[in-house]
């Protein structure tokens, strides 16, 4: 599928470590962004029903692949079910319908990875997961997983006798390392996919309306010349963004940097020519602050 480094999921599907995130990219800008990302070397694109940009993402895929002389199978595409619909939590039937709408907008006949975006309500998430299992069996999604699930949510799927997800997309970066959930995923051979890797940067989600729970003090911290990430990045001759993304890759997490700026897309893709040494990885391990900055369980703030 790609000559980029990949991680093999429990069912043998290979997911490229480098993905392109599209949250907060409006539908009418998504085609240009995705086409530019493919030109910059990305072979893995992450979108979601709730991002309301699947149509633009699909157009960008077609344009980007054609310009690069690539085919559909050269790119790994993820989208996600939003658990709620106009009439409340989606049933299994409504989940299958939502998947069809996503495929139609993307202009694809299958996705590589389909995720339940968030857990919310117990009865509903089991039914939605049953629908994803059906989509996997019918080969409409090459593999399936969840997002923002904790260890108990995953236990619940196991207790219901259902197949386990192959991936769980969660916020992971040195400030939010989630050792408990990460070790429970490892025990079940479920791959963590890291989102919001760049949250510690002062430049993270600064555009108007781009919500986060990041405080002014945390942003000021990121601007300090002696910030630990700046110091460490300088040692390797890379940027802080590259250091944060490389941390994820070395932990074994596929990463999903988002940018609308082609120069930053290229910078964020250049992760495989340096290695953070063991001492610095150990130092980064000490920086965990617990909960993340992107996800606050409020559906209106989802990413
Ligand atoms: N499953 C979930 O619930 C969930 C939640 C959040 C995110 N995600 C996924 O993960 C992706 C990434 O997460 P994210 O969008 O929160 O954040 P991110 O990729 O960690 O960071 C993006 C922010 O950093 C800026 N940025 C990007 N590259 C930079 C660089 N090299 N130097 C300085 N600033 C840079 C971007 O600004 P510009 O665009 O202006 O460059 C933007 O404000 C999302 O797009 C989405 O696909 C999933």
Image (cartoon, helix red, strand yellow):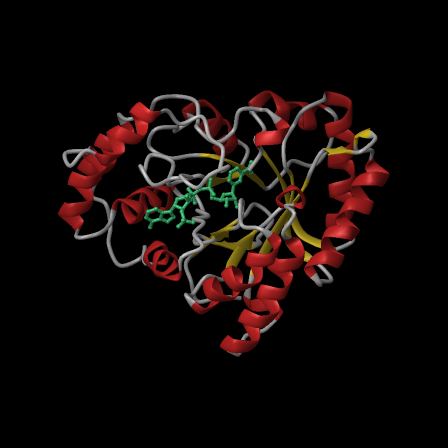
Residue visible at 83% across and 30% down in the picture? 87
Q: Position of residue 91 (x, y in %)?
A: 83, 33
Considering depth in this image, is 188 or 148 the residue closer to the camera? 148
Q: Is residue 113 left or right of residue 213?
A: right
Q: Position of residue 49 (x, y in %)?
A: 67, 45
Name the quarter where the C terminus is drawn. top right
Q: Is residue 101 left or right of residue 191?
A: right
Residue visible at 72% across and 21% down in the picture? 122
Considering depth in this image, is 130 or 33 the residue closer to the camera? 33
Quadrant of the picture in which ligand 1 is shown: top left
Q: Is residue 44 left or right of residue 241?
A: right
Residue visible at 68% across and 59% down in the picture? 106
Q: Position of residue 223 (x, y in %)?
A: 23, 35
**Total count of labels:** 0
- Which residue occupies the extreme front position in the image? 208
Residue 131 seen by the camera: yes
- Place residue 131 in its image quadrant: top right
Q: Position of residue 300 (x, y in %)?
A: 62, 30
Query: Where 293 falls versus 259 (above or below)?
Result: above
Q: Is residue 243 left or right of residue 169?
A: left
Query: Where 128 falls versus 269 (above or below)?
Result: above
Considering depth in this image, is 261 or 241 the residue closer to the camera? 261
Residue 137 seen by the camera: no
């Amino acid at each position: 599928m790609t000559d980029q480094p990949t991680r093999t999921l429990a069912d043998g599907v290979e997911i490229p470590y480098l993905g392109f995130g599209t949250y907060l990219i409006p539908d009418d800008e998504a085609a240009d962004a995705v086409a530019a990302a493919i030109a910059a070397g990305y072979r893995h694109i992450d979108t979601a029903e709730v991002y309301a940009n699947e149509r633009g993402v699909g157009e960008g895929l077609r344009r980007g692949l054609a310009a690069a002389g690539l085919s559909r199978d050269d790119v790994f595409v993820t989208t996600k079910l939003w658990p709620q619909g106009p009439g409340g939590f989606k049933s299994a039937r409504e989940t299958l319908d939502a998947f069809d709408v996503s495929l139609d907008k993307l202009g694809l006949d299958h996705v590589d990875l389909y995720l339940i975006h968030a857990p919310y309500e117990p009865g509903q998430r089991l039914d939605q997961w049953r629908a994803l299992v059906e989509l996997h069996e019918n080969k409409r999604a090459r593999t399936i997983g969840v997002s923002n699930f904790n260890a108990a949510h995953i236990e619940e799927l196991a207790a219901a006798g259902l197949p386990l997800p192959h991936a769980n997309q969660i916020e992971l970066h040195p400030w939010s390392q989630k050792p408990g959930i990460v070790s429970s995923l490892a025990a079940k051979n479920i791959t963590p996919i890291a989102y919001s890797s760049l949250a510690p940067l002062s430049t993270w989600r600064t555009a108007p309306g781009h919500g986060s729970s990041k405080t002014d003090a945390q942003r000021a911290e990121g601007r300090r010349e002696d910030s630990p990430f700046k110091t460490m990045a300088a040692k390797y001759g890379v940027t802080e963004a590259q250091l944060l993304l490389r941390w994820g890759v070395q932990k074994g997490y596929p990463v999903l940097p988002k940018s609308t700026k082609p120069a930053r897309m290229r910078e964020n893709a250049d992760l495989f020519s340096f290695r953070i040494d063991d001492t610095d990885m150990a130092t980064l391990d000490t920086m965990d602050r617990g909960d993340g900055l992107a996800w606050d369980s409020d559906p209106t703030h989802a990413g």
